Amino acid sequence: MQKFGFIGLGIMGSAMAKNLVKAGCSVTIWNRSPEKAEELAALGAERAATPCEVVESCPVTFAMLADPAAAEEVCFGKHGVLEGIGEGRGYVDMSTVDPATSQRIGVAVVAKGGRFLEAPVSGSKKPAEDGTLIILAAGDRNLYDEAMPGFEKMGKKIIHLGDVGKGAEMKLVVNMVMGGMMACFCEGLALGEKAGLATDAILDVIGAGAMANPMFALKGGLIRDRNFAPAFPLKHMQKDLRLAVALGDRVGQPLVASAAANELFKGARAAGFGDEDFSAIFKTIER
Ligand SMILES: NC(=O)C1=CN([C@@H]2O[C@H](COP(=O)(O)OP(=O)(O)OC[C@H]3O[C@@H](n4cnc5c(N)ncnc54)[C@H](OP(=O)(O)O)[C@@H]3O)[C@@H](O)[C@H]2O)C=CC1
Ligand SMILES: O=CC(=O)O
């Protein structure tokens, strides 16, 4: 039986870990808020008391955490990953973070004798539930091969992009595009509604042409129905835009539209919509 650890059981992590358990893997889990581990424990996952305990007891551990601060706390904090990682053990951080955070974690894990891979994912709650994520791995090749049986239960497309940092960069590029698209989409819907056009008619026209895409098809109806239940929390999209804009600074790429989208998402967070779906940017735009 394949054995994996899983740290971080939020919207994404709980669905991903569930797919490992359902596929018959032995999975040891930890989440900061213990109640989120209950459903998985009922399905047969083993609970650990700390991240340290998870990595100590598993050859390969996956993590899916909110942001750079969370990823660092779980790695460097008391009873964290670094206290348990030993010779040859693997740590695969699937959280969306900036390349520098990922590299810091990777260097520390390797210094303790462990192996490190970053593997952020593209695809939201439903693809996580369906095991159809796109996994953007980078780092230790042997660990990539060893983690593959786990990846195959979580994703439909798994790629290795090079050294640690490249997976994070790819993820930030993709999500920056997604955030900008959502902002423009919501402005279009709000403009159309104020001009007296029916939302269904706008969605129908967009869906029939070159701009048709699964995100607009899914989110369009939910925005029309004012359903902003979180699949991808708005606070995480703003974090991704912030990190993408910082990457633009670092490499000297102007990001005029994306910086504006970041400001919109910052405003939506300040308005209290951070825990709603990122499509709740519509509520800030329509006011
Ligand atoms: N939702 C989505 O559609 C997608 C999300 N992502 C990325 O995946 C990651 C997880 O997203 P998602 O599951 O939606 O987010 P959630 O907010 O649902 O879950 C975040 C997880 O991080 C944990 N966490 C936060 N802070 C800390 C901390 N200081 N110490 C320990 N654990 C902490 C939370 O623990 P607790 O339960 O205690 O709060 C929880 O397990 C993010 O980086 C996000 O950007 C990537 C692709 C799609
Ligand atoms: O990060 C979000 C996603 O849908 O991908």
Image (cartoon, rainbow, N blue to C red):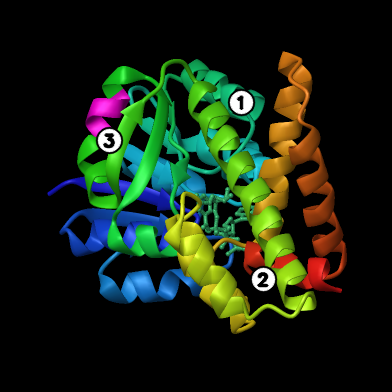
Q: Secondary structure at mark 3?
A: helix
Task: Judge: label 3 CB < 8 Å from ligand 1.
Answer: no
Asked if labels 1 and 3 touch by Cβ distance under 8 angstroms, the answer is no
The region drawn magenta spans 143-147
Residue 260 higher or lower than 22, as above or below: above
Asked if labels 1 and 2 touch by Cβ distance under 8 angstroms, the answer is no
Task: Calculate the distance from the C-alpha at mark 3 to the C-alpha at mark 1.
Answer: 21 Å
The disc at residue 276 is 2
Closer to us: mark 2 or mark 1?
A: 2
Residue labelled with disc 1: 99
Q: Which amino acid lies under the numbered mark 2 shown in the image of this protein?
A: Glu
Q: Which amino acid lies under the numbered mark 1 shown in the image of this protein?
A: Pro
Residue 186 in view (yes/no): yes
Residue 51 higher or lower than 76, as above or below: below
Q: Which amino acid lies under the numbered mark 3 shown in the image of this protein?
A: Ala
Quick one: label 2, few (<14), some, or many (20+) residues within 10 Å? Answer: many
Task: Calculate the distance from the C-alpha at mark 3 to the C-alpha at mark 2.
Answer: 32 Å
